[in-house]
Amino acid sequence: MRAQKNKSKAIKRSTIDRVILFLGYSVLALFTKMETRRKMKLGTSDKVILGIGYTVLGIFVLSILIPLVYILMASFMDPNVLNNQGISFRISDWSLEAYKRVLEDKMIWRGFANSFFYSITATAISVFITLLAAYPMSKKDLVGRKFFNALFVITMFFGGGLIPTFILMNQLRLVNTVWAILLPGAFNVWNMILARTYYQSVSGELWEAAQIDGANEIQYFFRILLPLCKPIIAVLALWGFVGMWNSYFDAMIYLNDADLQPLQLVLRSILVQNTPQSGMIADIQSTAEMAKMAELLKYSTIVVSSIPLLVMYPFFQKYFDKGVMVGSIKG
């Protein structure tokens, strides 16, 4: 039961991250279009609806920004000041001690390297398999298309469970290897449905023109279709990277070697179990000072672990608009 709860928490966390990414993009798109909407003549009811929308959106933004700003500022605070006074805006009360201890810890750097390897490799495998699986499912003349669609959808609601999956991984001798992290999540049905929908939005005349020029299915897929699918590829890559970066449950179950553990397990020991790495607080003798430093290390590790996602998103933002609106009604 405990393992199932941990898995559900991991799924919820990944879902929340996707919602935050989509909400952040929505805010950016909203403010970029405000100037255009000002020039439009709106009725009273339209203004009321827009006002309510802006208010609700503002509340969502504040509910996300306030905790983020608090964590960012707390990570730079002196432990004694943070514990006694809380957040202070005086520069003399700020300190980089927490970041110094975090960045000097070898387990943090090893966890970073492992997380980057797992996230990049798993994303590449997942996107490639998803794109290949979605292409035949987008063909209306595929024999058994409805049957395969139903088969894929069933797997979204029913699974083998944790224990049978672990037994299978153990029999395949994948436990305590990198493949135990990369293979189980290599295919996602929801992502396949998104890619299939995007393929169906591409004009069928391209395939007819490619046939006239003598291209076969493989040539059409790799040379013509994939270059047109950069938006959906960016969305799938972004979601896959974020999901794998925040994932810790599979690593907790299948990995025993500390050298293979991702950053999230290192953060789990600090944030959940409240047990920082011994090297971070080895020179602190007082129990009270150790508790203060451990609390401060929580904030700094959260900031450090979030940097890759914050840096990655702006590069995919221009594709996110097209990809996330796949299948929507455009007016």
Image (spheres, helix red, strand yellow):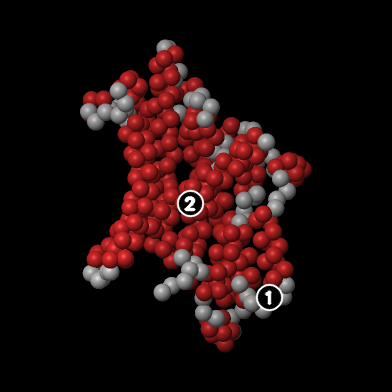
Judge whether residue 164 can be spotted in this image: yes
| Residue 262, image quadrant | top right
Q: Amino acid at mark 1?
A: Leu
User: In which quadrant of the rendered view does residue 78 lie?
Assistant: top left
Percent of width and height locating residue 193: 59, 64
Q: Residue at x 26, y 28 (%)?
A: 88
- Whole-number angstrom distance, CA of label 2 to CA of label 1: 32 Å
Residue 71's place in the image compared with 11, above or below, is: above
Q: Position of residue 259 (x, y in %)?
A: 57, 34
Name the residue at 73% across, 48% down.
Answer: 160
The N terminus lies in which quarter of the figure?
top right
Rendered view: 159 above or below 294: below
Q: Up-down: is 190 above or below 60? A: below
Residue on which the image places disc 1: 142
Residue at 62% of width from left, 56% of height from top?
Answer: 187
Would you name the residue on which mark 2 appears? Answer: 18
- Helix, strand or loop under label 1: loop
Residue 308 image label: none
Query: Which image quarter: residue 90?
Result: top left
Where, quadrant-wise, is the C terminus in this rendering? bottom left
In front of the other: 128 or 32: 32
Taking the view exactly as shown, the residue that stands out farthest to the bottom is 212
What's the residue at 58%, 56% (across, down)? 126
**Closer mark to the observer between disc 2 and disc 1:** 2
Q: Is residue 45 left or right of residue 321?
A: left
Left or right: residue 34 compared with residue 236: left
Question: Can I make out residue 315 in this image?
Answer: no
In percent of width and height, residue 317 lies at: 39, 58
Pinpoint residue 184: horizontal percent, then vertical percent.
65, 49
Q: Secondary structure at mark 2?
A: helix
**Amino acid type, mark 2:** Arg
